Image (cartoon, rainbow, N blue to C red):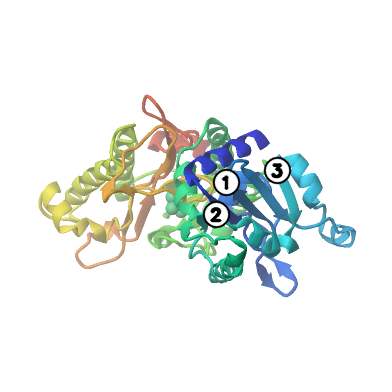
């Protein structure tokens, strides 16, 4: 693994030109009392290091001899008795292939040396006010050395611009991890489908998902699971998960694990009864057709917008048929009356972050899809009670979401193993 991270650092060096890059890991976060939130490293820091301890900073110094330097916690037997193993600089340098490693307490002092005579200072500019202040202060400290012929960096740049573009294109090792994350999450969705029945609570279904994640080594979900029965499915970020499932409800589950630092993001919607009927079945078929059209449009060379546009046209035709919208598909696209029932976009980049980094537009135009990009495809339909809506459609909330890698020839759907056709869902639910 360290090879992969070293290669990524080399690529970042190539993009940097003459400069110094400072990439801090995420801080630990207090939850309450003496209890912290589970620690999660900063995605970009981990992408470049593979090192997962808090209180660490990566410094890349360009020049004739490029230097990758880690700052991390020192060995501390007392703390290790309480909190567990820490590498310490020497073992970390050895194990993770850095040119040098130092105690984190020496960061400021060493940085004032390392910044000298570098043209550009790269760091996550503006991401954290304390870091902004600290970087400017250090730069000022370097400036005071002007009489010894040392110059402070003239230019400050956001290192995320460079790293985010790298992270947008996943290499084969990343795709392999994302396949595994997807496999665990599809198993969890299958488990939930077999478990669901009227009378239980949404959180009981959530527990099944988390159980399946954890027993496969995915200790955390990539985001808070949404388990939304009936009208709750019309709340896009519903996370209360505390209602009881009714036989007549549709259940929307948006849940995915994080595995080895990579997210999966899957939504399935199905009847608690195990049988699709009536208006709910009709709306489901529309959303599924929209999703199929969108996935089909996820091909290299197509615009980022192509899947969204393909889904929109199918959804709008469906909304017209259901008498939710009036006019022609083009007319509804133009007047945006569809937004009452479909108010989000059809997907986002997926990677180490569930809403992953990477620009969506270049020079103000939607960028084209390229091999190695990973995106979600997640059209939906959310119908709240309203006088101008047929009563049979009230409180129907449906979303279907898959994770898709763009390949040379087209795409690979990572999350295919979670059933989504009416017949496949009914078949699996019947077995339970
Ligand atoms: N689960 C977050 C999303 O679908 O974007
Ligand atoms: Mn989702
Ligand atoms: Mn998503």
What residue appears at the point 74 percent right and 50 percent down from the top-left corner?
Answer: 101
CA separation in Å, label 3 and label 1: 12 Å
Q: Position of residue 123 (x, y in %)?
A: 53, 58
In the rendered view of the protein, which quadrant contains the C terminus?
A: top right
In the rendered view of the protein, which quadrant contains the N terminus?
A: top right
Q: Residue furthest bottom?
A: 33
Q: Nearer the viewer, residue 269 or 116?
A: 116
Taking 386 as reference, is 65 left or right?
Answer: right
Q: Position of residue 317 (x, y in %)?
A: 19, 45
CA separation in Å, label 2 and label 1: 8 Å
Q: In the rendered image, which residue does mark 3 sit on?
A: 99
Badge 2 marks a residue whose secondary structure is: loop
Q: Which mark is residue 118?
A: 2
Q: Residue furthest top?
A: 409
Q: Is label 3 within 8 A of ligand 3 (CB to nearest ligand atom)? A: no
Q: Which mark is residue 164?
A: none
Q: In the rendered image, which residue does mark 1 sit on?
A: 62
- Does label 2 or label 1 sit earlier along the sequence? 1
Tell me: residue 387, above or below residue 320: below
Q: Nearer the viewer, residue 134 or 72?
A: 134
CB contact under 8 Å: marks 2 and 1: yes
What residue appears at the point 19 percent right and 64 percent down from the top-left corner?
Answer: 388
Q: Position of residue 243 (x, y in %)?
A: 51, 64
Mark 3 Cα within 10 Å, few/some/many (few <14, many 20+)? few
What residue appears at the point 25 percent right and 47 percent down from the top-left corner?
Answer: 312
CB contact under 8 Å: marks 2 and 3: no
- Does label 3 or label 1 sit earlier along the sequence? 1
């Amino acid at each position: 693994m360290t090879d992969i991270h070293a290669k990524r650092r080399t690529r970042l060096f190539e993009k940097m030109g003459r400069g110094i890059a400072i990439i801090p890991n995420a801080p630990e976060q207090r939850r309450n009392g003496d209890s912290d939130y589970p620690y999660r490293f900063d995605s970009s820091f981990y992408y470049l290091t593979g090192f997962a301890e808090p209180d660490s900073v990566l410094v890349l110094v360009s020049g004739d001899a490029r230097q990758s330097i880690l700052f991390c916690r020192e060995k501390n037997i007392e703390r290790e008795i309480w909190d567990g193993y820490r590498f310490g600089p020497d073992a970390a340098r050895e194990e993770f292939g850095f040119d040098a490693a130092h105690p984190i307490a020496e960061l400021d002092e060493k940085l004032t040396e390392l910044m000298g005579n570098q043209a550009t200072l790269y760091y996550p500019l503006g991401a954290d006010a304390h870091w902004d202040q600290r970087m400017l202060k250090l730069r000022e400290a370097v400036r005071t050395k002007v009489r010894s012929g040392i110059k402070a960096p003239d230019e400050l740049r956001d290192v995320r611009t460079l790293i985010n573009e790298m992270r947008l294109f996943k290499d084969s090792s990343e795709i392999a991890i994302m396949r595994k994350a997807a496999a665990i999450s599809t198993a969890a969705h299958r488990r939930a489908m077999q478990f669901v029945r009227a009378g239980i609570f949404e959180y009981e279904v959530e527990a099944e998902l988390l159980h399946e994640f954890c027993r496969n080594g995915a200790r955390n979900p990539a985001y808070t699971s949404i388990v939304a029965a009936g009208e709750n499915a019309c709340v896009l970020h519903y996370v209360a998960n505390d209602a009881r499932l009714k036989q007549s409800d549709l259940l929307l589950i948006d849940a995915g694990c994080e595995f080895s630092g990579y997210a999966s993001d899957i939504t399935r919607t199905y009847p608690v009864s195990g049988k699709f009927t009536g208006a709910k079945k009709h709306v489901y078929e529309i959303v599924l057709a929209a999703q199929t059209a969108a996935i089909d449009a996820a091909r290299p060379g197509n615009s980022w917008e192509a899947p969204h546009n393909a889904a929109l046209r199918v959804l709008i035709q469906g909304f017209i048929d259901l008498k939710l919208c009036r006019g022609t598909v083009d007319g509804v696209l133009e007047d945006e009356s569809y937004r009452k029932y479909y108010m989000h976009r059809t997907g986002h980049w997926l990677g180490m972050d569930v809403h992953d980094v990477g620009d969506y537009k270049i020079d103000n135009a939607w960028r084209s899809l390229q091999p190695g990009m990973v995106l979600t495809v997640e059209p939906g339909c959310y119908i709240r009670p309203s006088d101008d809506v047929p009563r049979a459609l009230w409180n129907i909330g449906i979303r279907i979401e898959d994770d898709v890698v763009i390949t040379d020839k087209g795409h690979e759907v990572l999350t295919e193993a979670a059933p989504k056709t009416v017949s496949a869902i009914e078949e699996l639910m019947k077995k339970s």
